[in-house]
Image (tube, rainbow, N blue to C red):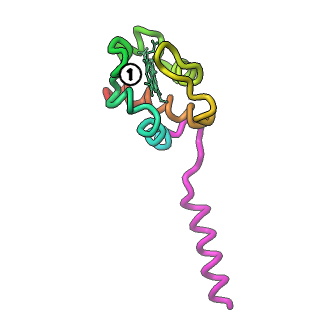
Amino acid sequence: MKRIWAIAISALLALIVFAPPAFAGDAGNGAQIFSNNCAACHQGGGNFVNAAKTLKIADLTANGKDSVEAIKAQVTNGAGAMPTFVGRLTDQDIEDVATYVLAQAESGW
Ligand code: HEC
């Protein structure tokens, strides 16, 4: 019986210690969200629908989308042929994917 408790308590401790913290703008989660929801049109930071609006830093800057806030607004509201993601992604997911996109753009994808 003692042994079972010891195992249960160690398992619980391991969970607490190793659970990934949910910080604002988690780029790891953002990468997952991106491949599931954005890559169909934006594979590798491109734009298969509108080639003048890629996710490369030059286009983001030219179009005023070079901030997490602006990317969040784009994903939240949609624009042109890009759909809105409200109701499909949570606010946290949108924050994470925007953080990921900007980080990728800044490092050249
Ligand atoms: C159905 C295809 C499609 C999907 C899916 C899609 N987008 Fe887009 N995206 C577009 C199009 C088209 C535009 C250009 C919209 C416009 O005319 O302003 C765009 C523009 C953008 C821009 C602005 C780029 C610029 O240089 O102005 C960002 C940022 C962006 N998308 C991020 C995302 C993210 C993040 C996701 C996933 C959550 C996503 N998109 C999913 C089609 C898509």
Q: Is residue 17 above or below residue 104?
A: below
In this figure, which residue is indicated by the disc labeled 1? 55
Q: Choose top left, top right, bottom left or bottom right for residue 31.
A: top left
Residue type at the position of mark 1: Leu
Residue 100, how many percent across, how many down? 45, 33
Q: Is residue 4 above or below residue 74?
A: below
Q: How many marks are shown on the rendered structure? A: 1
> Does the numbered disc 1 mark a residue whose Cβ is under 8 Å from ligand 1?
yes
Dot 1 falls on a residue whose secondary structure is: loop
Could you tell me which residue is drawn at 62 percent across and 36 percent down? 90
Q: Is residue 79 magenta?
A: no
Q: Choose top left, top right, bottom left or bottom right for residue 42.
A: top left
For the residue pair 64 and 9, the one nearer the viewer reads as: 64
Q: Is residue 7 magenta?
A: yes
Could you tell me which residue is drawn at 50 percent across and 33 percent down? 97
For the residue pair 22 and 74, the one nearer the viewer reads as: 74
Residue 11, how many percent across, how many down? 59, 72
Could you tell me which residue is drawn at 39 percent across and 33 percent down? 39
Residue 65, how many percent across, how many down? 47, 15
Which part of the image, by quadrant, shows the N terminus? Answer: bottom right
Which part of the image, by quadrant, shows the C terminus? Answer: top left
Where does the magenta region start and end? Answer: 1-26
The chief SS type of the magenta part is: helix
- Left or right position of 35 against 2: left
Image region (quadrant) for ligand 1: top left
Neighbour tally class for label 1: few under 14, some 14-19, many 20 plus, Cα within 10 Å: many
Could you tell me which residue is drawn at 61 percent across and 28 percent down? 86
For the residue pair 102 and 41, the one nearer the viewer reads as: 41
